[in-house]
Image (cartoon, rainbow, N blue to C red):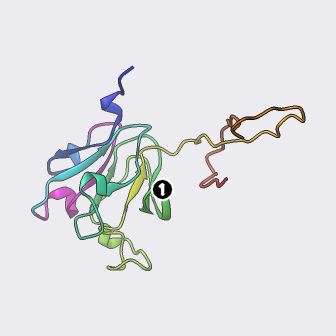
Amino acid sequence: MPPNESAKPKVIQGQGKDKCPSGHLCLYADAQFNTSGDRRDILVIPPDAAANNFSEYGFDHSGDGVSAVVNNTSKDTKLFSKIDQRGDQLPIKAGAAIDDLTKYPLTGSPNGTWNDQAQSALAHNEPVPIPVIAEPQPDAHTTNRRQPVSGTAGAKVEKAEL
């Protein structure tokens, strides 16, 4: 079955908070929802999707990163200062909009704020599947030392390491 293209993050062009489609998380290249500068890129993250590395979409730490956010979903979400939902976190409430990330301090960042520093996000704040490793049976025969893993974790779990 081909992948659902509408469920993948994509970059659109525009200005204004109203350019964020309903049910999506939108990240703007310039403050004031792209009305304060020359850039018009908006990274649109669909429901239940993740953008694990904003640099893949042209948003990076070089001054071309995320400067404003619209959470046009019914669920809280977070921005992360590192790829793959790691590092510092900036919570974004459901229905909230942030017009200028320079107003949000981020200790240790080159500019001291979240402006141009976010590198990954989830478009939801749901329980995420994590592996649960079962103890092998005493009479188990393995050829490649692999075994299936499965399970889920509650919403409070932020990281699982194996």
- Relative to 152, say whether 114 is above or below: below
Q: Which residue is mark 1?
A: 85
Magenta segment includes 160:
no
Q: Residue at the spot x=36%, y=74% of the render?
A: 113
Q: Nearer the viewer, residue 16 or 4?
A: 4
Q: Residue at the spot x=18%, y=51% of the render?
A: 16
Q: Nearer the viewer, residue 31 or 40?
A: 40
Which residue is the extreme one toward the top? 1
The picture places residue 80, in percent across and down from the top left corner, at: 44, 60
Q: Residue at the spot x=21%, y=56% of the render?
A: 33
Residue 137 falls in image quadrant:
top right
Q: Which residues are magenta?
A: 21-37
Which residue is the extreme one toward the front? 143
- Relative to 153, say whether 157 is above or below: below
| Callout 1 secondary element | loop
Query: Could you classify mark 1 by the number of other residues whose Cα lies within 10 Å: few (under 14), some (14-19), or many (20 or more)?
Result: many
